[in-house]
Image: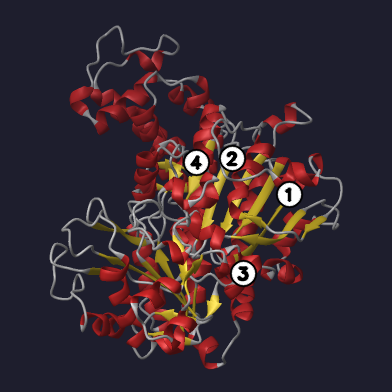
Amino acid sequence: MYQIPCLLIKIKHQILRTFFFKAPCSPAERDFRYAPSSFLQGILDCKEFCLFFDSLANPAAIRLSSSKSSCGKCTRCAVQNSFRGIYLCLAVLVALTGCAHLTNQKTATGSNPHPKPKIFVIILDALQRKTLMESLDSLPNFKEIIKGRRNDYPYIYFENVLVSIPSSSKPSNTTLLTGVYPDKHGVPSTIWFDRKDQKIKTLNSITQRQITDILHETKTDTIFDYARRAEITTMAVATQVAKGVDSRDWIQQSVHLWGQAFCLNLLQDFNAIPDGAHLDRGTTVGLLKGHMYSLTDGLEGKLRTSGDIPDLTVVHFVGMDIFTHYPRRFMLQENWSLSEIQKWYLQKSLDPELGKIKTFLTKHQLYDNTIFFFASDHGQSRIRKHIDEKNFEKSISNYFKVMGRHYSMDQAEIVVMPGAGTKTLYVKNRSNSGWMTPPRLLEDVKPVVDALIDTRPMNEHLNALLVAQYPGERDGFPPTTGKSGEMDPFWLFNLSYYRQSDRQNHDFLEALDPLSQLDALVGNNLKAAYMYRRDFVRQNIPDIILINQPGYFFTPDRGKYTHHGSIYPDSAYVSFMVSGPAIHRFSDAPQTIVRQIDTVDLVPMVAHLAGIKIDRPVDGINRLLEEQ
C-alpha cells in the first residue's frame, strides 16, 4: 500500500527540482543513481528534460529561445519544441522499465574514517519511564541500536527525566525541541484562553503549522534554527515543532493519512479513533521515501539528489499515545496494565518500524555513523475515575455566567478550559469589562472558590487549588497577613483549612500559602512549584487551577483507558537514552544516570553531539558534559 513505484518517484523528484532549483540541473541534481543505461544518462544530462517538466508545472512561465534550448553537451538537446520534449519524456519512461533498485551510494563514510555522525532524534510519544529498557530483550531492533549486536555499545541512559507539567503533548514537545520552558516559547497547554486577544487558542494534531506560528511570534528558536545557522542539514518528520526546517525537509502527516487511520481502526476494532500503528507506519514511509502528496523528499530522495542524508533528523512517532489512550478491545476486557499495553505496542509496531530505518541505513553504508536519541514527550497514567466536564461546567454555571453556556465572551464572567488531570479557570474582573485587568481576590476570585468547594464531586477528586497572584497588580494585603511580599505567579490554596473555617474574607486570605508548599503536597521530586513558575505569562495565566487526585481525569467515560496531563510521576516522568554505532566516540562505557534531569536538556545534548552552536540563551543544560 505504501510502496511508491520507482517510476513515480523519479517523476516526482524531477518536478521537485523544477519547483525548488532555480539553476539548471547540476551534476549532483541530475544523479538519480539508478544505474541507468548510457542512453538514459544522456537524457538525464539534458536540460530539455528539466524544462519539459517545468512546462507541465507552469507552461506560461516557459519562454524557450533557440539559444537556451540546448545545454551544449549532447545532440539530443538540439530540440526546441514541446513535441520533442514529449518524446524525451516517453524515452525516459521506456528506459525506466524494470528499474527497481538503487545502486550503492558513495557516502562520507567511505572517504573519511571519522566523519561527523548523523543524529536521529526519535520521539516515542507517551512512552513511560523504564518501559523501553525493561522490554529490550523482546525488541531486537531497539536492542541492537541501544546495546549493540554484541552488547558492546557504551550507551547513556537517563532514567529519571521530568517533563514540563502538566504533561500535555503540545507544550511538552515544544519544550523538548526548543530547550526552553512554556513561559518563553508561548505554548502553555493544548488549549488555553488568551486574555489579551480574548480568544481560545486550540492546537490540534492534524493542523501542523500552529506551533511554528507561535514560535515566530515569541521569537523562540528550535534545534532546527540553531542547526541552520551552523550549516547543519536537518529533516523533521511528523513533528509539529518544525520552525527552522526548510519546507522541502518537513514531512508532515497529512489529513489523508489520518483519515486512513480512522477508517482502519473502525474496521478492525469498531472504534472511531485513529489507528496509531497505521500513523507510525506512515511516518516511517515519510521518513524513508517522502510522500507524493507532500512533494517532499525522504532519505531516499536526499541520497538521489545530493548523495547524503541530513545531519540531524527528528522523527515523531505519535501512535503509542493514541494506542495507549484507546487500546485494543481484548486488552480492555482482560484488564491489561499500562506497562503491558505499551510493551505490546513496542514489540508489534514500533520495533518493526525501527528495523526498517536500520535496514535502510545499513544498506546505504550509513548505519555505522549514526547516533540515536530516544526520548518521550510525556508519560501516561491509568484512569481511576472519569469526571464529566459537561456536568462540571453545568454546576459552575448555576453560580456564574460561563462562556459558551448561553453567554458570549463579552457577557461571561468565567472561561472554563477543558482539562485532564488539571483544569484552568479564567475569572473576569467584574468591575471592569477587560479580561486583562486582574480580578479582585475577595470580590471576584473568592466567590468562584466558594462555588467550587460547594460542588459535590470536588470533595472527592480535588487535591490542590492554585490562585494566581499577579505580583505587583493585586490589591494590597493587610500588613497582618504577611503576604504582601509574595512574588510567585500562584499561591497554593489551603483547602483543608478553608473548608473548616467560616469562609470569611480573612479566612480566604489566610488560606493563601506559598506555592513552594505544593511540592510537599504532591511530592518534592516532581518540582511542581518550579514548573508552574515556568508555565504561564501574563497574557495566558489562569486565575484558578484545579489539580486532581492521582488517576482522576476530566474526561467522559467513552472507552478512554489511560490519560496524561497530570503532575504526578506516571505522567510527568519519562526516560531517554543516547546510543547507536557512533556513540563510542563520546562515551567509554554504558552509563545509567539516575539523578533527575528535564526534557528541556535535550536540545543542548543534541547540539553537542551534532556540532551545533547554541547561540541564544536556553533553559536546558548539556548533561553529557557533566557526565564526562
Q: Based on the displayed image, in which of its 4 quarters is residue 523 positioned?
A: bottom right
In the rendered structure, the answer to whether residue 406 lies left or right of residue 442 reads left
Which residue type carries mark 3? Gln
Q: How far apart, in angstroms, are the residues tagged by discs 1 and 2? A: 14 Å
- Looking at the picture, tell me which residue is in the foreground, 595 or 304: 595
Name which of mark 3 and mark 4 comes first in the sequence.
3
Which residue type carries mark 4? Thr
Q: Name the residue under label 4.
A: 222
Name which of mark 1 and mark 2 comes first in the sequence.
2
Element on which disc 1 rests = loop
Is label 3 or label 1 in front?
Answer: 3
Q: How far apart, in angstroms, are the residues tagged by discs 4 and 2? A: 13 Å
Residue depicted at 69% across the width and 43% down the height = 370
Q: How far apart, in angstroms, are the residues tagged by discs 3 and 2? A: 25 Å
Q: Name the residue under label 1.
A: 580
| Image: 603 above or below 48 | below
Viewer can see residue 107: yes
In the rendered structure, the answer to whether residue 233 lies left or right of residue 201 reads right
Residue depicted at 41% across the width and 9% down the height = 72
Q: Mark 2 points at which residue?
A: 312
Element on which disc 2 rests = strand
Element on which disc 4 rests = loop
Which residue type carries mark 1? Gly
Element on which disc 3 rests = loop
